[in-house]
Amino acid sequence: MSTDVSTDVSNIPANLKYTKSHEWVRLEADGSIAVGLTHHAQDLLGDMVFVENPTVGRELAQGEECAVVESVKAASDVYAPIAGVVLAVNTDVEASPESINQDAYAAWMFTLKPANAADLDGLLDAAGYAAHVASEAH
Amino acid sequence: MADLKQTPLIYKHREANAKLVDFSGWEMPIHYGSQIEEHHIVRRDAGMFDVSHMLPVDLKGEGARDFLRKLVANNVDKLQTSGKALYSCMLHEGGGVVDDLIIYFLNESWVRIVVNAGCADKDIAWMEVQMAKHAPGLTLTPRRDLAMIAVQGPNAAAKLWQAMPGMQDLAAPMKPFNAVVVGEMFVARTGYTGEDGFEIMLPAKAAPFFWQALLDAGVKPCGLGARDTLRLEAGMNLYGQDMTEATTPLESGLAWTVDLKSERDFIGKQALLNLHFGGKPARQLVGLKLLDRGVLRNHQPVFSEHGEGEITSGSFSPTLNGSIALARVPAGVNIGDTVEVEIRDKRMQAAVVKYPFVRNGQPLV
């Protein structure tokens, strides 16, 4: 019934990688990756009220639906940015979904052990993601 | 957004950094930052909504009451004093709901009817057809020249008087579900939140100044997102979701607004009697409270031992900090039952509860 008509591209850190489905990806020192929702995504969705993470140990294919976030407005699927095994989930974010609104890049949802580290190269960089967000606004 | 209609308050919304969305063809604020905060402001203090997309229609002429006796399902003879308001459904011949509306009775030859934005065109067309048949002497005037602002919350009255001191003498003594004309303003003690509050209609040109005066008095702008969670907690139906042209008021928990007892013959009455064998529908609207984690949403299927149903309005409830819904289920389902709701291929448990869920700031379930 209602569609969003505004956008916010101002908050896209340069040190992260991104997907077209609005996940951010951070490469950790141990070679694992942390995954969360971008600032833009939380801005589109509004106040977060529910987070469901994948189970630890689950093997994910790239692009597989693996988590759900729900805002007051709508439910939204979260996809695996690259293939890998779920190492850990952030139960703090499940208990306080609003932390995604407060600081989207601090509120990681789960971590993955990549099946193939080179897959990271296929993700968008900050400029690429900004362009993607801009293209979706039209 | 070139095709969207705008209210006289669009610049005030932009100034306040509102998130604007397409709402029934209107460019409207969904929130100004946080829908949940706006929700709490209305439950605890005072918030305001631009509801200028809704349409006041003035029905004038001798015999307005007689025409309404035919046009709407509720008993307009309840309207005996000037300013009295009445909530009613307007039905088509088949008993389905054309729209739900509020009728403000000013006198025997002036009645103001406020209709939903998304239904305004079809409502006027419908009313004109019925007028031609039953009351050709009346006039029907859509008031697109008016803006409408809802000020809602426990502190709405105090802050409204602060913003508009001249209004207090006439408006303060008003009981709920009444309206009074104050100069160029039409002030009604009505709303869609389950809190005390006012809906004020005023000339479009004056609306930005009035909005600013309310801001200065500490009334916070709230978007249509909060309005929806507030009305759901208050157990108020939303047209297009909880009732449609395909459902009757008796299937939507609105039997209390349908006058089947008097001799009066309103449009849709015979169909209701035929369909429901004297007033007992096979489906009913109930409240649900989710017992598992998750969020109830519109159209999710509901499973009970009496058969299947469907959620008509589901959301997160900020006041209850859980999920609630209105659902249309078979008549055998009772308050206190546990039913299952399918959320993303999983069956979740929900309690069948009485609604409203929240009234005047207090949780009721």
Image: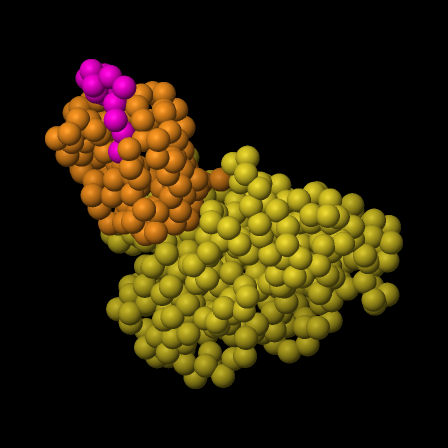
In the foreground, B42 or B121: B42
> Compared with residue A15, is residue B286 higher up or lower down, i.e. above or below?
below
Residue plotted at (36% across, 20% down) = A61
x and y, in percent, of residue A56 in the image: 35, 35
Instruction: Indicate the chain coloured orange by its letter.
Output: A
User: Is B331 left, or right, of B103 in this rendering?
Assistant: right
Can the viewer see residue B272? no
In the foreground, B72 or B186: B72
Residue plotted at (31% across, 26% down) = A85
**Quarter assignment of residue B76:** bottom right
> Compared with residue A97, is residue A56 higher up or lower down, i.e. above or below?
above
Residue A31 covered by magenta stretch:
no
Can the viewer see residue A77? yes
Residue plotted at (66% across, 49% down) = B328
Q: Which residues are magenta?
A: A111-123
x and y, in percent, of residue A116 in the image: 24, 17
In the foreground, B335 or B73: B335
User: Is B261 left, or right, of B291 in this rendering?
Assistant: right
> Compared with residue B84, is residue B137 higher up or lower down, i.e. above or below?
above
**On-image quarter of the N terminus of chain B:** top left
x and y, in percent, of residue B93 in the image: 78, 47
**On-image quarter of the C terminus of chain B:** bottom right
> Compared with residue B97, is residue A57 higher up or lower down, i.e. above or below?
above
Residue plotted at (35% across, 75% down) = B159
x and y, in percent, of residue B182 in the image: 46, 74
**Quarter assignment of residue B212:** bottom left
User: Is B304 left, or right, of B167 in this rendering?
Assistant: right
Give the colour of chain B: yellow
